[in-house]
Image: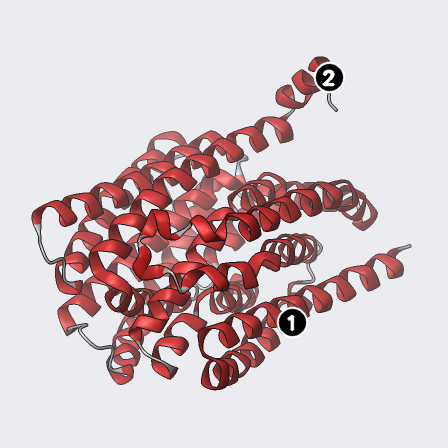
Amino acid sequence: MLNRAALARLKRSNLGGNFFVYATDYGLRIVVQLGYFLIISRSLGPAGYGTFAGFTAITAFVSTFVGIGCDQVLIRHVARDGIPFGQAFGNALTSVLISLPVLLPLVVVATLMLHFEGLPLDAILMVAVAELVLYRLVSLCNACFQAHEKARQQFVINVSVLIIRLIAAFMAWQFFDPLTLQIWSAWYLAGAVVAVCLALGMVLTQLGRPVLVLKPCDLGDGFIYALEFASIAGLRDLDKPLVVQTLDATAGGHYTAAFRIVDTACVPIRALLSATYTRYFHHSRKGTSEAFAFARKVLPVMGGVSLAVGLGLLVGAPFVPLLIGEQYREAVPIIQILCLYPFTLGVSAMGGDVLRALGMQKARMIVMIFSTVTYLPMVWVGATYLGIAGAAVARLVSQILLLAATSFIVVRAGKAES
């Protein structure tokens, strides 16, 4: 147990202070995301929610390539390389501009080819613009403050964006009955416009204006970052449209609802990951051994937090229909199957942070791409022969394999250093 003096020292430290801010940030996210999830899942119903979640999973995957990894390049430039912020920010914005003419039409065409039921073209366009353009800029603004270890500003952006999205969902729910996918897409876009104005305004007033430049030498590393985060997005969400296409939209709604509950419960894990992420880069300046030493200190905390989250999911799953409605009763066993997901997520993501800080993102990228490519056939087989429960089991197995591969690379790199 920490005594009061030790707790006070932890709060006064930059890392400790950032963790408390991130923990508060993500704690509020739980409340706001839950409210948003309750409104949208109840208003659209399992079929409508499954369709919307399947489509947004595709846009989220493609959006990771917008800017060609510019947010991670910006963090590295500012936190490690000492490049002036204006140039780093301008380079990131230019990367976004040159990638959009290719990626925006791509996601629209891909969605039309999948024939999502009840999803018209104008709805596709509105959500695509919101995800690929507006929310991608919000993410870039968040990275600007993360590069400076300004967790409080990230807190303001993250919570404000969620509150804006919650307000949009509430207003759409109040003013339109029934709430169709077309109507909700318009409100979704409107919320994204407000969010990006807030985030850009904060960056411009507190950190400065961008100097629009393009560093072609960064595109290679940026593309590797983009591939890795695309793989992360794919591992997180591409199973949703796959379940919708393999089974139906209603099954996809149950499956997605279960995963959203699990994902929301992982908030403390993401708080710890966010608080420590930039620190790996700082420690890597002093040498590889320093980065590994820091990781060894964080690992027991990460393991304890993630296992506690998993236990909470296992015990609390039967009470979920009381929150989102009895129509989602089929989501309960899916949540219980995925109770080990928080542990595999936390430890594997932590290993990925270590590899990125040490410049080993190529090894990490190979593991992530392989995991993404292999887990989709696994989920398809599970869904085809065992329904949504089979898809959930396959999803968990793929995450365990990712953890094993990442751990192997990190341990091997540590042995090579020693």
Q: CA distance from mark 1 to mark 2?
A: 41 Å
Query: Which structural element holds mark 1?
Result: helix
Q: Quadrant of the N terminus?
A: top right
**Do we see residue 150 in this rendering?**
no
Q: Which mark is residue 82?
A: none
Q: Which residue is mark 2?
A: 3
Q: How is the image coloured?
A: secondary structure
Q: Amino acid at mark 2?
A: Asn
Residue visible at 36% across and 45% down in the picture: 33
Q: Which mark is residue 367?
A: 1
344 left or right of 381 in image: right
Callout 2 crowding tier (Cα within 10 Å): few <14, some 14–19, many ≥20: few
**Do we see residue 352 in this rendering?**
yes
Residue 179, compared with residue 164, is above or below; it is below
Give the x, y percent position of residue 172: 14, 49
Residue 314, compared with residue 13, is above or below; it is below
Q: Earlier in the sequence, mark 1 or mark 2?
A: 2
Q: Residue furthest right?
A: 418
Residue 267, compared with residue 127, is above or below; it is above
Callout 1 crowding tier (Cα within 10 Å): few <14, some 14–19, many ≥20: many
Residue visible at 17% across and 52% down in the picture: 187
Give the x, y percent position of residue 406: 70, 64
Residue visible at 22% across and 54% down in the picture: 188
